[in-house]
Amino acid sequence: MSKTPTIHIDDRRVRAKRDARIYGHFIEHFHRQIYGGIFEPGSPLSDDRGFRTDVVAAIADINPAILRWPGGCFVSAYHWKGGVGPQRRPYYDKAWLVEESNQFGTDEFVEFCKRIGATPYICTNGGSGTAEEMADWVEYCNLDTGGIYAAERRKNGFAEPHKVPIWSIGNENYGPWEIGAKEPEEWAIFVRESAKMMKAVDPEIELSAASIARLDWNEALLREAGAYLDWISLHHYWDPIWETNDLAPYETCIAQSATVDGVIEQAEHLLGALGYLGKIKIAFDEWNLRGWYHPRSNPAVGDIIGARDENDRNDSYTMADAVFSASFLNACLRHADTVKMANIAPTVNARGLIYAHPEGIVLRPTYHVFKLFAKIMGDTVVDSYIEGNPTLKLDTVGEDAPPVHALDAVATTRGDSSRISLINKSGGDTIVVRFDIADPRPLASAQLHSIAPDSKNAYNGVDDPDRVRITTRTIEIDGGSDLTLELPPHSVHVLTLT
Ligand code: AHR
């Protein structure tokens, strides 16, 4: 690396306010995310309502602005009425092929959100469900007086409405894997009619609908239902290993991280072409580096339910996940004017930030990335660019793929402090980086908060839970604002300048 890369920052040029919901969450009735994850009645680690207090505390500590529930594919055959009140109706979940006890339903979800300090965001059944069922759900949650379902909520001990402010219609209904998948025209009309009924019950709610970056899908959806929508829901998993669990190596993950901006821009271009840019917000309401492992068509897998345990192996979650996730959040910050929500999928167990087991929890590397971004980064994105950013030579990058730069940085402010995210994606090289701050004010203090373990394959496990963690050091500033930092390979940081 010849020239020292320089990050130029101009705090005076504000790009956008970031929406804290980009550090949002998702939890699905899949394997051990709900039962044995966030909810475990009878466990010594749970409170009197069955919520795992260690899990609640860990999620609350990363400022979870919003939580999406109950699916995912699960929701496309979920009927919410069986999951409220004293008589829960267990049923066979056709999406994941297991019995669903319905012990965790709407009231438990809203109570859980209160405990962690998140806004509840409900995804409705756009597969086997109906517009009426969705509107009844809004009534149950949000109607203050009157209404038979709202009366049932009051009878169930919730006199005050749950006031769920954002609802999404459906989940991935474009996909043949989804129960009740639909064609674009069919979907568009279904969303329009569902939206009409839901907003008739509570005109204050914001609505999203399942979408994909495809022109035909959005053309129909926005023509028919655009006037009712505040959001579109997009999903993306960059290492789609649903059938094989064949984890891509670090270098491939890093190459994928360079494609995130392009994925967002594709959605922006679609909204722009259809006249909705700036009117409809983007919710990446499921995202993660790797798809969850739930093989169905792989003949080599015998026990397809037991195979899902593989998702819970902590050694699968390394700095590849952390560096990718930090890159994803940086891309959301760069597009802060259009991406107003993003929900890591999922939060607990499977590919989650937190591994919950009967005796405790493990905070995986990406958990610490969320802590850096949600707690330390600023709330306003300002102008910055990198001069002399080295390009990584990776075998895994195809000819038409974007170049993979070693360094990724986004500058933000909070009050009169600057907060800059810094990622060194290189698997082997330290980068020395220089800062050029326009209109420099004398710096009083600088602190570097880092996730920088000794190996790109480092992970946290039950026996070694703190190998990947945040360390903080004060940076000596010798007068003025000249600053140079060494960033070790495969590391993520937030620099705060006051
Ligand atoms: O693998 C989990 C699934 O991924 C979610 O249920 C679905 O929404 C997405 O396709």
Image (cartoon, rainbow, N blue to C red):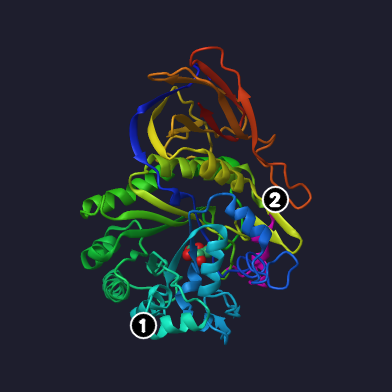
Q: Secondary structure beneath disc 2? A: helix
Say if the magenta span includes residue 311.
yes
Say if the magenta span includes residue 282.
no
Percent position of residue 407, x then y: 50, 30
* Residue 177 in sight here: yes
Q: Is residue 138 left or right of residue 486?
A: left
Q: Nearer the viewer, mark 1 or mark 2?
A: 1
Q: Please identify the quarter of the rendering in which residue 386 is found.
A: top left
User: Is 17 above or below relative to 8?
Assistant: below
Task: Give the class, few, some or many, for how many residues have Cα within 10 Å of label 2's Cα (few <14, many ≥20).
Answer: few
User: Is 194 above or below relative to 357?
Assistant: below
Residue hosting label 1: 146
**Kind of residue at disc 1:** Gly
Q: Nearer the viewer, residue 488 or 498?
A: 498
Percent position of residue 380, x then y: 40, 38
* Residue 79 in sight here: no
User: Is 18 above or below relative to 164?
Assistant: above
**Kind of residue at disc 2:** Asp
Q: Secondary structure beneath disc 1? A: loop
Which one is earlier in the sequence, the residue at label 1 or at label 2? 1
Q: Nearer the viewer, residue 171 or 145?
A: 145
* Label 1 CB-ligand 1 distance < 8 A: no
Percent position of residue 78, x then y: 48, 78
Q: Is residue 190 left or right of residue 4?
A: left
Give the magenta part as a residue range.
Answer: 298-315
Residue hosting label 2: 315
What's the distance in space between the residues labelled 1 and 2, CA to CA? 52 Å
Residue 312's disc number: none
Percent position of residue 252, x then y: 54, 43
Residue located at (61% from left, 52% from top): 247
Q: Is residue 482 left or right of residue 224?
A: right
